[in-house]
Structure formats: C-alpha cells, structure tokens
Image (cartoon, rainbow, N blue to C red):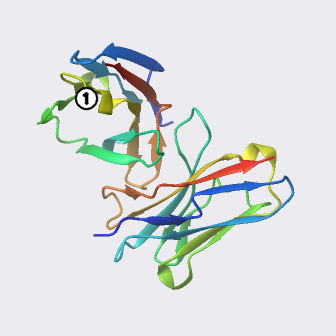
Amino acid sequence: EAGVAQSPRYKIIEKRQSVAFWCNPISGHATLYWYQQILGQGPKLLIQFQNNGVVDDSQLPKDRFSAERLKGVDSTLKIQPAKLEDSAVYLCASSQDRVGGYTFGSGTRLTVV
Amino acid sequence: AQKVTQAQTEISVVEKEDVTLDCVYETRDTTYYLFWYKQPPSGELVFLIRRNSFDEQNEISGRYSWNFQKSTSSFNFTITASQVVDSAVYFCALILTGNQFYFGTGTSLTVIP
C-alpha cells in the first residue's frame, strides 16, 4: 500500500513569510496527525483530525498555525507568519483505528532564516 | 502527567556488538500502548513495535527484542549483533486511549564498522 505522502520535502523561507505543507494519508485512514519535530527532540503533536473534524489542537499555536482537512482526506498545515523557532521537521501521520500503528510520512524540513 | 524518558542520548557500539536502548515511562492510566520507532538520517519514522499495557510478553523479531516490565515501567529495546544499517535515532513513545503520542527525546545509535 502507498505510504503517507508529504510535500514539499524541504522548504526555506524568510521569517514573516507564509508557508504551507500538504499531506495525503493512507487511503481509508480516518485519523490524521501533524507533528512538529525540532532538531534533537521527539515529535510533538500539533493537531489531530478524525475524518474532517478536529479532535485535539491544544498544542497548535493558533495565532500563526492553521490546519484543515477538507473532505476527510488530504490535509494542509499553514504557518503565517513564520518565526525562526518554527524551523523543524513537520511530520504527518495517519492511522486506521484510534490507537493503531501509525504510519508517518517522510516529513517536510522547514528552515526559517 | 505522562512522560517518556530515554536517558541515553547517544550510544556508539562496534559492529556485531549487542546494544540495549532504555525507555522508562510514566502514566497513571491503566490502558496504554508503547511504541518504538526508528528514525534514520532520511528523517522518516519507521514503526518497529507496538505493545499494549496488558501484554507483558517479551517479543523477538530477528535481531530485535523488546523487554516490557510494568513493575519498573520500562520498555527496553535490544539489538543483537548490531549492523551499520542500525545507525539511527530511536524513539520510544507512549500513547493513551486519547490517542496522543508522548515521545521520548530519542537515543542516537551509531554502529561503527
């Protein structure tokens, strides 16, 4: 089966610019997650969707980050405006059941300069 | 509060040596899952194992084995006869029934040829 697809693979932007990441989960996976992984740390959950509804966005910096999952399939994560501390790898994951084995995408490495 | 501790930040071993990566977790929940993920330099998170809190059987998969002990809240991972391809960062993670992941800070393993 195809894995979780993410694009772009790398992105370099200047601070205060905007950026968007895209994720296509595994077909049929109802749950989709966005994680932020800062260098040297473990991934941190930003937002969790169940179909197209938000289950948990308690750690999403809502003043600059937004995410949507239209039609319960693909998802986009946006940062506007970006700060230097947003430099990280943004990982998308999906799972079939609520406590299933996640499948992670390869991530988008964002560098804010 | 939920927490995962991987006290070993970096480990280096010579090829063919055995190596154990430690993981200690904290939770008051009685139902939870523990995971190990491998993150090679390419960045994706590769699922290795999932274990639920009611299953304390140790597991062996090829050169990999896992030792789950609820009495000490530990879920250690052993690689037997290590190989250069095992070089990666390994993450231990805890997930509760609410489905949020709590990752440790990772252990960077270097296998020297």
Residue B96 location, x and y as percent? 39, 48
How packed mark 1 is, by other alpha carbons closer than 10 Å (few <14, some 14-19, many 20 or more), is some
Pointer 1 residue: B70
Q: Name the one closer to the observer, B38 or B81.
A: B81
Q: Name the one closer to the observer, B47 or A99.
A: B47
User: Would you place residue B65 above or below residue A1 in this image?
Assistant: above
Residue A58 location, x and y as percent? 63, 56
Q: Is residue B111 visible?
A: yes
Which quarter shows the N terminus of chain A? bottom left
* Quadrant in the picture for residue A100: bottom left
Residue A77 location, x and y as percent? 64, 66
| Residue drawn where x is 37% and y is 71% of the image | A26
| Residue drawn where x is 21% and y is 18% of the image | B16
Q: Name the one closer to the observer, B32 or A107.
A: A107
| Residue type of the residue flagged with mark 1 | Lys
Q: Residue under mark 1: which chain is it in?
A: B
* Quadrant in the picture for residue A18: bottom right
Q: How many marks?
A: 1
For this orientation, the residue located farthest to the bottom is A71
